[in-house]
Every structure is written in structure tokens, then in C-alpha cells.
Amino acid sequence: MDPHFKYDIRDFQMHILGLLDVMDEVCRKHGLTYYIVGGTLLGSVRSQGFIPWDDDLDVAMFREDYETLLAHYREWLPERYSIQSFESNRDYSRHFAKLEDRNTTLVERFHLRRMEGVYLDIFPLDDVPDNRMLRWLQYRRYRLFDKLLYFAYRDPYKHGDGFSSRMIAFFQKRMSRERLHGRMKAILTRYNGMKKCSCCMTHGGGYTAIPKTAYGKPAMYKFENGSYCGPEDAVTYLTLSYGKDYIIPPPPDKRETHYFQYCDFDRGYETASFDELKKLYDEQKKK
């Protein structure tokens, strides 16, 4: 939530929890494997629910199941829900997918000029080489194209009409979004199925290599009022992701929240006006 647009984070958490139920039901029905990961798994292990300041949900799937879900979500999901990915929406900037509620409206950052429904992140799990140098090179390629994708979609005049803004505008005119996404996917899937790749990465906010054996056969984890699939070896996953003291909450100044700039649980984004919402947001900032 944004400091200029306040709402109850607990209400937000309870709303997106319904998306995890939808994800679980679809995967069980169609034989797909998913894992709760990131802060979702960490919250489950710490307190069997949301981390109090966390305002998202994260799941991961091995690439084969991830691609199957993207290919069939239109026939598998109730009409109220959809999956956003570059494959389904050329205006979508990320290299992972989101399961969203079409009856809601969410704006992460107005300078990206994108509206969507409240969502759950779905990260593909891709192989990475055991060789540390090759893995480091893979990471650097990923970071480069992640940054290029950001510049390809953001408002070039976010910070005014200076030299850097004009350079970004020039870049957007010359660089195809389709080409950037194609290069990013080629990077992410480069080592899939190869020998000497005993680890995989989610390519989310971090780039930590997790042994495939840590994911293994999904185990059940209590989260709020339900139980969901997670890595077989949560200790290894959480230690590699957050350090050996992962069970201890961070100090207040290290607790990260998305600070979404606009959220409406009662109006679908497909019927909303971006300019109207931006005007409302600007008016609230002045108060």
C-alpha cells in the first residue's frame, strides 16, 4: 500500500488468500505441482499464516507445469479469474505470471501505466548450472534483461523531461518488447534439462539457487485456515533464501511492503479508467 493511499493490509491478505485456494484447486484437478515459496512459505513456517506486513502470495512451478497452466488457464479457471503473462498480454512487463481476480483493480505504480486485478505471483522454476561461474554469468544476463524490460514499459518521463528521460523514450522506440521477452525467456530456460544442473531458481526478486531435491515431493503446510503444497525440505529452502536465522523476524526498518498505489476490491480493472484513477491518486497525495 502507498503512504498516500491507505487501506487495511489484513483485508488485502484475506482477499488474495482466495487466489491461493483457486490455484490449489486447479493444480490438484489437473495434476500439476506447485509450491508455496518466498514470504508465503516463510509466513507458514513462522506463524502458519501471512507475515503481518506482507501483501502478496508467491507460488512456484517447474517450467513444464508452468507452461501447461499458461496454455490451459482459460478453460480451467472460473470466469472471474485470469492469468496475466506476456504470452497472453503484450502489455504485461514481467517474465513470470500472475493469477488475478478480474473483479478487482490494482495499480502497483502509476508510472508503469498498468492496471490489473489483485494477484498471486506464479514463478517458473528453471535449471541453472552447478558451475558457479556459469551460474554467475546466467545471473548477470538475467539482471540485464530484467532492467531492460523495466525501462521498456515504464513512463519515460516519470522524473521529468531531461536527458535520461529522452534516452529511455528513444530506447522504447528502437527496442521491441517482443524481442526483449524472447531473449529473457531464452536466458531463463537455457539450461533446462541439461546435465550438471542439480539446482533451480525462481527468478523472482532474488536469484538464489535451490537444490531440486529441496522441492521434491510437495509437503503440506498450514497457512491461515487452509493447507497448501510447499517444498519437501523447507529448512534447506528457507536457509538458502533467508539465512540460518530465518525464523527470527527482521527489525521494523527491514520489513518490506509493496505499497501499492491503488486498490479497489469492488470494481474490475477492465471497466476502470486509468486516467480517472491517476487523478484520484494525485488528489489524495495533495491532502
Image (tube, grey):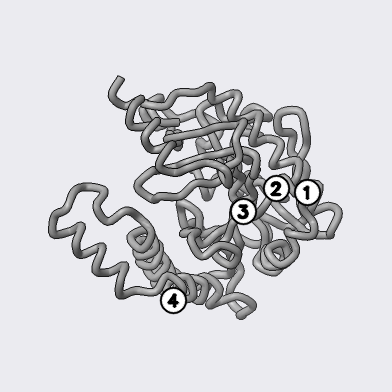
Q: Position of residue 232 (x, y in %)?
A: 72, 50
**Could you tell me the amino acid type at mark 3?**
Ile
Distance between mark 2 and mark 3 Cα atoms: 14 Å
Distance between mark 4 and mark 3 Cα atoms: 22 Å
Do tag 2 and tag 1 residues touch (Cβ < 8 Å)? yes
Q: Residue at x 54, y 46 (%)?
A: 116
Check disc 3 and report the residue beneath it. 122
In terms of depth relative to the viewer, which is nearer, 217 or 146?
146
Q: Which dot marks residue 179? A: 4
**Could you tell me the amino acid type at mark 4?**
Arg
Q: Residue at x 55, y 77 (%)?
A: 191
Image quarter where the C terminus lies is: top left
Q: Which dot marks residue 78? A: 1
**Could you tell me the amino acid type at mark 2?**
Tyr
**Could you tell me the amino acid type at mark 1?**
Pro
Disc number lying in front (4 or 1): 1
Distance between mark 4 and mark 2 Cα atoms: 28 Å
Q: Residue most toward the top? A: 287
Mark 4: give few (<14), some (14-19) or many (20+) Cα within 10 Å.
few
Q: Quadrant of residue 211?
A: bottom right
Disc number lying in front (1 or 3): 1
Q: Which dot marks residue 18? A: none
Distance between mark 1 and mark 3 Cα atoms: 18 Å
Point out the tag, 1 or 3, that comes first from the N-terminus.
1
Check disc 2 and report the residue beneath it. 81
Disc number lying in front (2 or 3): 2
Helix, strand or loop for disc 1: loop
Helix, strand or loop for disc 3: strand
The reply, left or right, for residue 27 in relation to residue 92 is: right
Q: Residue most toward the left? A: 163
Q: Position of residue 274 (x, y in %)?
A: 44, 44
